[in-house]
């Protein structure tokens, strides 16, 4: 355990009813007790909250009226003594309490240091620590559900099971190599290694098969809304966001910049980008917006391509079909409340197997079908976060791919009849890659880098 005591504000800075200042470490209770006017915190029961005041030791004035939670090690998040001071929200009150704690010997915590201590003290493993940040950043209830299950250790338990199976296999082979008392030892050892590597390889493949969906739930789908000016792109964004984020007019070229917003579509988080209409223009400002739109198009995972039901297809529309060829996109034929002038058969021909949804955004028609199409594009319908173990972290996905490749190298060596002590090198590499996911074989520099991405006070 650490020898110093850390403190930080654990709630967002700004005005609010309550703010929390957290301490963790061997002197957390002593430091707070010296400033606390109320019960003796050394005498109160663990996991209780106590009313009192924080006093300024320099002026002996009341710094704030507070409620102090006392949690004694080891039944705490960090497995150290923890104090949480609930004071009034607002910049002055919370900063005053923090400054007093620092003056009495506490050290300002580094970003993510509370969670890092939980990891270093064996309270959680590395994948569970990363899930804490995923939970904070979750944009939908589905993303939160995945993060909660990872925090609860679902992925950790599976990884630990796979590592144990590999370890037992290596140990079995080692014993047979060291004590070759029977003629069929080598053949038996090859068979054990072949069977176990195939089983672990299959489980890793199953994890990777849903990794794309997990990554989407964690990070969201970068989604661009494209189309010629005045086809209803901004109206579509406002409908999905359910706010008037974008200016809606009948003047072409109104949107001249990129507008971004996160939206929840049937549990799928979309990082929605309303772009300037892509067309040839002489307006310098609009030209910049059009070029930015093309850049967004290249970086998107999903494209919502809006057409006007009240206009025939133009050369510009056909060029946009060329631009999105090979990408995941949904065609939205908007303004069905107006006279049909578009050739829908030609649209189907250009779109191929891509979904085509007809909408009247002004009448709020077709939105439900659009949301279904978006979910089906990436999840084949409903998203299952019940019994499914999702891998959502890009670091975990990369390590699983490396573990899978190492196992394939081992399997290839077995089929070629290579000596088992050579094959074991690749099996051991697999064991190490899996260990890096949960932190058993992670380097100190990697651990420092991961926790530095956390918010202060977590």
Image (tube, helix red, strand yellow):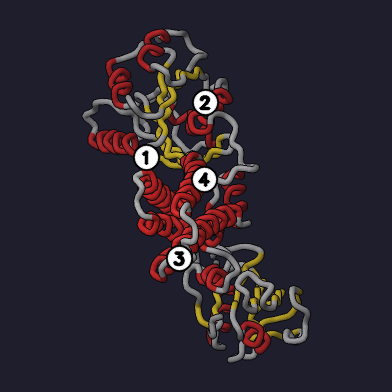
Secondary structure at badge 1 equals loop
Which quadrant is home to the C terminus? Answer: bottom right
| Residue that numbered label 4 is attached to | 199
The residue lying at 48 percent from left, 44 percent from top is 198
Spot occupied by residue 1 in the image (x, y as percentages of width and height): 56, 80
Position of residue 179 in the picture relative to residue 386 (left or right): left
Name the N-terminal-most of marks 2 and 1.
1
- Contact (Cβ within 8 Å) of mark 2 with mark 4: no
Q: Nearer the viewer, mark 4 or mark 1?
A: 4
Residue 445 lies in quadrant: bottom left
| Residue that numbered label 2 is attached to | 373
Does residue 279 sit above or below 260 in this rendering?
Answer: above
| Residue that numbered label 1 is attached to | 258
Name the N-terminal-most of marks 4 and 3.
3
The residue lying at 59 percent from left, 81 percent from top is 25
Spot occupied by residue 126 in the image (x, y as percentages of width and height): 51, 62
Name the N-terminal-most of marks 2 and 3.
3
* Disc 1 to disc 3, C-alpha distance: 66 Å
| Residue that numbered label 3 is attached to | 178
């Amino acid at each position: 355990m650490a020898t110093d005591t850390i403190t930080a504000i654990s709630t967002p800075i700004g005005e609010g009813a309550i703010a929390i200042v957290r301490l963790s470490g061997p002197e957390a209770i002593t430091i707070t007790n010296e400033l606390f006017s109320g019960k003796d915190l050394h005498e109160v029961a663990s996991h209780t909250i106590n009313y009192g005041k924080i006093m300024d030791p320099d002026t002996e004035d009341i710094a704030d009226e507070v409620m102090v939670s006392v949690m004694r090690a080891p039944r705490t998040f960090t497995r150290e003594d923890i104090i949480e001071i609930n004071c009034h929200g607002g910049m002055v009150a919370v900063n005053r309490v923090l400054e007093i704690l620092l003056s009495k010997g506490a050290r300002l915590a580094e970003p993510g240091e509370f969670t890092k201590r939980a990891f270093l003290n064996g309270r959680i493993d590395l994948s569970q620590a990363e899930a804490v940040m995923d939970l904070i950043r979750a944009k939908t209830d589905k993303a939160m559900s995945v993060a909660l299950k990872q925090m609860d250790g679902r992925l950790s338990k599976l990884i630990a099971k796979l590592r144990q199976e590999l370890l037992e296999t290596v140990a079995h082979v080692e014993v047979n190599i060291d004590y070759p008392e029977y003629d069929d030892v080598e053949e038996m050892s090859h068979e054990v290694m072949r069977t176990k590597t195939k089983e672990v390889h299959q489980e890793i493949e199953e994890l990777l098969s849903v990794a794309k969906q997990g990554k989407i739930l964690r990070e969201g789908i970068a989604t661009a809304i494209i189309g010629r000016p005045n086809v209803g792109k901004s109206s579509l964004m406002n409908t999905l966001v359910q706010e008037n984020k974008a200016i809606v007019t009948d003047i072409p070229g109104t949107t001249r910049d990129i507008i971004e917003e996160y939206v929840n579509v049937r549990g799928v988080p979309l990082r929605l980008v309303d772009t300037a209409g892509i067309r040839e223009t002489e307006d310098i400002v609009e030209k910049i917006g059009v070029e930015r739109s093309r850049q967004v198009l290249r970086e998107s995972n999903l494209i919502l391509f809006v057409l006007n039901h009240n206009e025939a297809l133009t050369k510009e529309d056909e060029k946009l079909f060329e631009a999105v060829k090979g990408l995941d996109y949904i065609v939205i034929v908007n303004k069905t409340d107006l006279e049909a002038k578009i050739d829908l058969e030609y649209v189907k021909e250009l779109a191929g197997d891509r979904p085509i949804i007809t909408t009247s955004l002004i009448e709020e028609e077709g939105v439900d079908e659009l949301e279904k199409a978006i979910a089906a594009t990436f999840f084949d319908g409903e998203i299952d976060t019940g019994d499914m173990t999702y891998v959502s972290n890009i670091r975990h996905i990369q390590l699983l791919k490396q573990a899978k490749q190492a196992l394939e190298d081992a399997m290839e060596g077995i089929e070629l009849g290579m000596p088992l002590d050579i094959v074991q090198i690749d099996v051991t590499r697999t064991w190490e890659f899996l260990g890096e996911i949960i932190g058993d074989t992670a380097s100190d520099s990697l651990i420092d880098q991961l926790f530095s991405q956390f918010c202060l006070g977590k």
